[in-house]
Each structure stands twice: as C-alpha cells, then as structure tokens.
Image: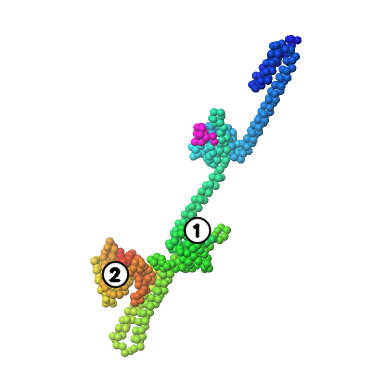
Amino acid sequence: MENRKFTINRTLRKLKRRQIRTFAPQPSDTSEAGSIRSARRQRNSGQSGSVLLPAMVRQRTRQLTEANNLLQSIVVRSQRLDGGLQASKELFRSIFEHAAAGMNTITLEGRYLQVNPAFCRFIGYRPEELRHLTLFDLTHPDDLPATCKQFEALRAGNCEAFDYEKRFIRKDGKPVWGHVTSAWVFDDLRQPLYGIGLVQDISGLKRSEADLQGALHSAREAQARIACILESVGDGLVVTDPCRRVILMNPRAEALLGVSQSQVAGKVVTDPALSGLLPDSLIGFLDGRKEADQFELKLAAGLHNQPLVLQARRSSIRDSCQSYAGTITILRDISREREIDAMKTEFITTAAHELRTPLTSIQGFSEVLLTRSDLDKGECRSMLSIIHEQAENLGRIVNDLLDLSRIESGTGFVLGKTPCDLTPLLKQIAAQFSLTSDCHRFELVLETDPLIVLGDRGKLIQALENILGNAVKYSPGGGPIRIAAQIREGDVCVSVSDQGIGMTEVQRQRIFDKFYRADTSNSAIEGTGLGMNIVQEILKAHGGKVWVESIIGEGTVVTFFLPLHAPDA
C-alpha cells in the first residue's frame, strides 16, 4: 500500500514539473503555489494520502483542461492564418496570371523570377527565354541610363519603389513603350529581396501623344501662316463674332482706321467707347444696320492729309456645321482708284478741250478760206500757217493718246535705235522754243561735244519737247530756262531747269502718274497730264532714268540719264 502511494505521488510530481515548464504559470497564481506548499506540508507532516490525492488530481485536471483549451485556440488560429495565407496566395496567383497588364518579379540584378502571360505578349519572349535575360537586356539603349539610376537609388536605400516610363526592345527588334511601376520587398535588415513590377503598354498612348504634338505643331504653323497672311494682306480685315464683338483686326485695318486692336478687341461694335474710335458709318455696317453687303466711306484725312476713301465689304463666316460663326469685313483703300477716276474724268474734259481748240481754229480758218475770195496772198498764208500749227498740236495730242494706249497694253514703244548725237537735237529744240516764246530766255550749256547715244531720234525729240514744254508752261512769268548736258560716269546727263511756280513734295512724287497735272487750278496751262509719264516710258525704253527736283515758288529741275554710245562699239 505504501509503495503504491509513493509511485502515485512521484508520477504527480513529474506531471507537475512538466506542466510548469510547458505552460509557465503566471506569478499571480498564488493560490496554486499555496496549495502545493500546503500539500507538501501535509505530506511532510504525515497527513493521510486519501486527503491529498483527490485535491491534487482536481487541480491537475483543471490545469490540463486550461492548457488543452489554449492549445486548441492556438491550433484554430494557426489554421485560420494558414487558410488566409493560402487564399492570398491563390488570389495573387490569379491576379498575376490573368492581369491584362504585364507583371513580373525581379531580383536586384534585374533577373526575372516570374513573368505573367501579358508581359510575355508585351515583350515577345517566352517565359523560359526570359530566364536567361535581364531587365537591362530588354531596355532601349537611350533609356538604359535612367533605368540604371533607379536601381542605384534602390541599392542606396533612397527609394522603395519607382514609377517611370521607358522603351523596351521586343524580340522582333521593335521598340515598345511601357509604364513601369515597381514595389520592392525587404528583409529584416532592410535589404531588397525582390521587386514586383507592373508594366503597362503605353505605345498607343505615345503614338497618340506624338500625333497630338504633330497636330499642335501643325496648328501653330498654320496659326503663324495665318498671322503672316493677315499682316501682309493689302486690305484691312475686321472680324466680329456672332455677338458683334470685335475679335480680330489686322495691321492694315489698324493703319487705315487709325486705331489698334487692343483698343477695340472684345468690345461690342455698339459700345459707346467705340463711337470715338471708329466712324459711325462703319459701326452701323459692322452692326448690320446697313442692309447692303458693300458700301464706301470717306475718312477726313489719310496719307499726306488727302481724303481716304474705303470700300467696306462683308461676308458671313460659317463653321464646319454651316452655322453662323461671325462676320469678316474687308476694308479696301480705293482712294487711288477714285482719284484715277477723277483724273480720267478731268483728262476727258481736258482732252476734249485740247482737241476742240485746234479743231475750232482749223475749222474757222478753213471756212474763211473757203468762203472768202477777197483775201490776198499774205492773209491766206497767215491763216494756213495757223491751220498747220493747230494741226500739229492736234497730231501731238493724238500721238500722246496712242503712246498711252501702247503703254497700257504692255506692248511699249517700237524703237528704231541708231547712233544719235544729242547736241544738235538740244540746239534745235532750244531754238524752236525760243521762236515761240518771247518771255523766256534759253541757255544752252554743253560741256562735252558730241553726246552720242543709241536711240530713236523721233522719240528722243518727243521726250525733250515734253520736258521743255513743261518748263515753258509752268514758268508763265518768263525767265531763264537752262539746258545743260555733260558726260558723267559713262552716261549722258541732261538737265532742264526753270524758275517757274515749282511743285510741292506731293506733286513732285506724282509727276509721272498718268493724267496728273501739277496745277489744275490754272486752266490757262494746257496739257493732258500724259507728258511726263510718256517721257519716263521713253527713257526707260532707252535704258535711262529720269527724276524731278522742285521747290514751290522757286522752280523745277528735270534730270535724265542715257547710256553713252561709243562710236566704235
């Protein structure tokens, strides 16, 4: 009996020690320690085993139950964690395999550990081929420095992920663009283990971006071309939107109207602020109050303080849907045309007068000769001389008109050029005018003799007569008329100067215009306004040039050059 009790007690003590080592009871469990110490005291004091054993069995049973419950909870929790981990692995594998974008796992050396089908389609390699290649082998040479820089930053601990765009080289050699996003996994020492990369194919996006850049570049070029056209166009342009706001005014319109675009841009044409900047008639036209699509307006002062006549013409702007998008108004300076029209009208009146004068003389004196038989020879000869002189005047007017016709048609003059000495021509014409004008004194200064040019003798005489005729006409008070000729730098230089009424600068600039007469207020001065224009055309046909210098009230100098002709050439 005693041996049996000893064996049971020893077994309980072993279980007790094993339990203490395994489950490490909390220091706060003072009741348990007290019971053990009490049991030992009871045992040492020789208490009965029948009292000790049931208490110890109950206590050990409770401890084992608690330990078992703890172990079961740990097992359940471990099973749950294992199940969640397995589910996460399956989810990652599913995402990895079926992702539309390329995915891979790589080492710090750039070697591929895993690749998904989308990445293989993107790069054109099979998975087993990629095991022998690195990320750097597939990178475009131009983007390799940027890729190496990202991995260097990762090694240095300056980043844990990177996001950038670069080009890959496919197996077929074609470059493709990819948007790379890579996140890295680190060990306990913060050393990178592997990276999980996402590669999105952005080649289409890059092509669209390039197309957009090309379109923007083309748009900028088109805008620049339009700006150049608007700046260089000879007519003024004013563009208004559907709300009648001024949105564009080109430089020519600014010059014609005397305002800048910044003063009117964005303003409605009926804005009171524009009434002092733009003519009222133009504002009404831009506002649509004038029903006609074209009208003329006259501005008070234009170039050289001359009235400015503008022709305004408008048309609607339609967008791609044919909807009304605004109005463009074209302003054309027709001052010159209207001035030419006025000069033509004046020319017709003047030409009719110039033609009627000799015709009246010819008709009157010829009628006297026909109806009167009592005239002596002297009277008849005098009348015939007048008839002949007027016929010559009539012939000159007709010749001027014919010359004008040739100039206008572009055929020019038909010249019979021969070596011609200007010295006798100048003497002849000076003598001719000295006979018909008693109040003028002709001075002929010839520094060189002869003055040989290659030209048409008749046309040169016509040019000289027109120049000297103007000197006589525009010196109504008489005075000296100086004709000088010399050789200058291989050319024959001839100048005719008078001390007549002279011209203003505006008149001087227009002296060679058709139908222009410098002093139309004096109706006693004859002429059709064609003389100097014909002179210029004759000298051009001979390879020469002519210009005029004049001071109002002091006189005029007409100078022309003709190429010198060498007799042995």
Q: Is residue 435 left or right of residue 210?
A: left
**Residue drawn 64% across the image and 33% down it:** 88
Give the quarter of the image for residue 308: bottom left
Is residue 548 shown to the viewer in this render?
yes
Residues at discs 1 and 2 in contact (Cβ within 8 Å):
no
Residue 530 point in image, percent of width and height = 37, 71
Q: Is residue 561 above or below residue 85?
A: below
Q: Which mark is residue 266?
A: 1
In this view, the residue farthest toward the bottom is 374
Residue 356 point in image, percent of width and height = 38, 79
Residue 90 point in image, percent of width and height = 65, 34
Q: Residues within 10 Å of mark 1 (few under 14, many from 20)?
A: some
Whether the magenta-drawn stretch holds residue 150 is answered as yes
Residue type of the residue flagged with mark 1: Gly
Foreground: 207 or 133? 207
In this view, the residue farthest toward the top is 2
**Residue drawn 49% across the image and 63% down it:** 272
Callout 2 secondary element: loop
The magenta segment is 149-161
Give the image's coloring scheme: rainbow
Q: Residues within 10 Å of mark 2 (few under 14, many from 20)?
A: few
**Residue drawn 43% across the image and 62% down it:** 258
Residue type of the residue flagged with mark 2: Glu
Q: Which residue is mark 2?
A: 554
Q: Compute the Cα span from label 1 to label 2.
A: 53 Å
Foreground: 442 or 339? 339
Q: Quadrant of the N terminus?
A: top right
Foreground: 32 or 12? 32
* Marks 1 and 2, the one that precedes in the sequence: 1
Foreground: 97 or 95? 95
Give the quarter of the image for residue 298: bottom left
